[in-house]
Image (tube, rainbow, N blue to C red):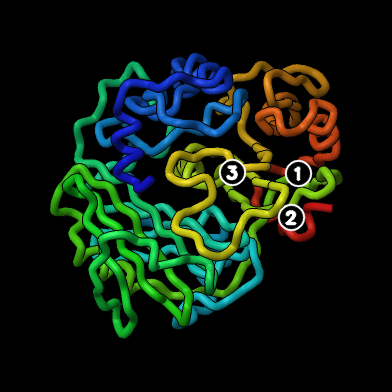
Amino acid sequence: MRMQNLVELATSEPPPLRYTVDEIVESGQRGQRRRRLGWAASGATAVAVLGVVAAVTIPSLTGTASVETASPSGPNAGALSGTTQTVPVAAEPFTFTFGAYQVGKLRVAQPIIVSTAYQLAPVYADGLTTNDKASDPKQEPSRSPSLYAYLTVYRPGAYDPTKLAGARQVTIGDRRGLEVDGSEAGTRTLAWEYNTNAWAVIDARSSEADYPAAEDLRELAAGLRGSTPTEAKIPIKMAYVPSGYQLDEVGMHAMTGLNGIAGARDGDYAGLLFSDPALPTTGLTEPYGGVEGADPPGSFLVFVVPAANSNQQPSSGVTCLNGFCNRWAANGTVNLQVASGGRLSNTEMANILNGITLGNVQDDTTWTEVGAAIS
């Protein structure tokens, strides 16, 4: 499903909801604990997380949000501003290899999600609102021009450009590219080969048919440069992972996948995606879970979020409901959650949570590199 299909889904009548999504939507109707007004309860598919309000579809083009500023921010803002490479270099999985940059009115923010196959970063535009943080439902919805866009930088061999249907060939610098205009005005996809057999993709959905234009996206693509490779860090250490499960994706200051992009500025601490078997690292056309933010087959998720971003009430010990378990830390201010949609038993999810050691969520310079954080 392409991004424009998700926009249609997000603004249509809600389909039958799973219990977990019902719970998310119900709990999300109160102040800051509701996600972005105009799309949180729209009925689009969400990840199988009952306790965390943070996972539902893309932002509305008419919802209330603040305009992202042009100043660099986010994880690794300092580390990624180091040595600049001509192109992002090949590096180990879970390593950020580019940083924030701006071309004209368009800006790529720091990458916040990294996997065994790609990195993800939000894209913002001066003068356009991006609805990727919680808003007060009592506030009148904004009618400001809006943008939902993100950059995916795939590892060599991970992306399959032959599956981009209806694309026309373009040139990005001296590199080949492919461009697609969506069925709706303002919806565009640009893919280009930033290095040999290594592709990046910008997906953009704007309320303005002519902005950003195809030429704007090409110029933004041409500005991509690599930075000193920096391994993602998380504020936890995990002593237990069920046998057979492998880490596929990490969100730093974000949830995983496009749910993390949809809530990029919501203040979440971390998200981790594990699966058995491991998810594919070649032949991809979109991030894991797709634009629906679905749970990949055979997966479970770990979330580390502020209490204000959870619809669960703090309690002692580990508590489990329908397909997920919670543990509260830092005097009830941080919600640790494992969600498996029934793929793991409550005992296994409790073992995962009891094996987590929480660090200082407020200081990411003290966080642990992913490779050392998971036993």
Horizontal and vertical percent for residue 298? 67, 42
| Residue in the image at 31% along x and 59% along y | 165
Disc 3 versus disc 1: nearer the observer: 3
Q: Earlier in the sequence, mark 2 or mark 3?
A: 3
Residue 296 badge = 3
Q: Which residue lies under the disc numbered 1?
A: 359
Q: Is residue 115 above or below residue 333?
A: below
Q: Earlier in the sequence, mark 3 or mark 1?
A: 3
Count of marks placed on residues: 3
Horizontal and vertical percent for residue 31? 44, 19
Residue 133 badge = none
Q: Earlier in the sequence, mark 1 or mark 2?
A: 1
Q: Which residue lies under the disc numbered 2?
A: 368
| Residue in the image at 50% along x and 75% along y | 88
| Residue in the image at 56% along x and 45% along y | 256
1 lies left or right of 173: right
Closest to the observer, 361 or 119: 119
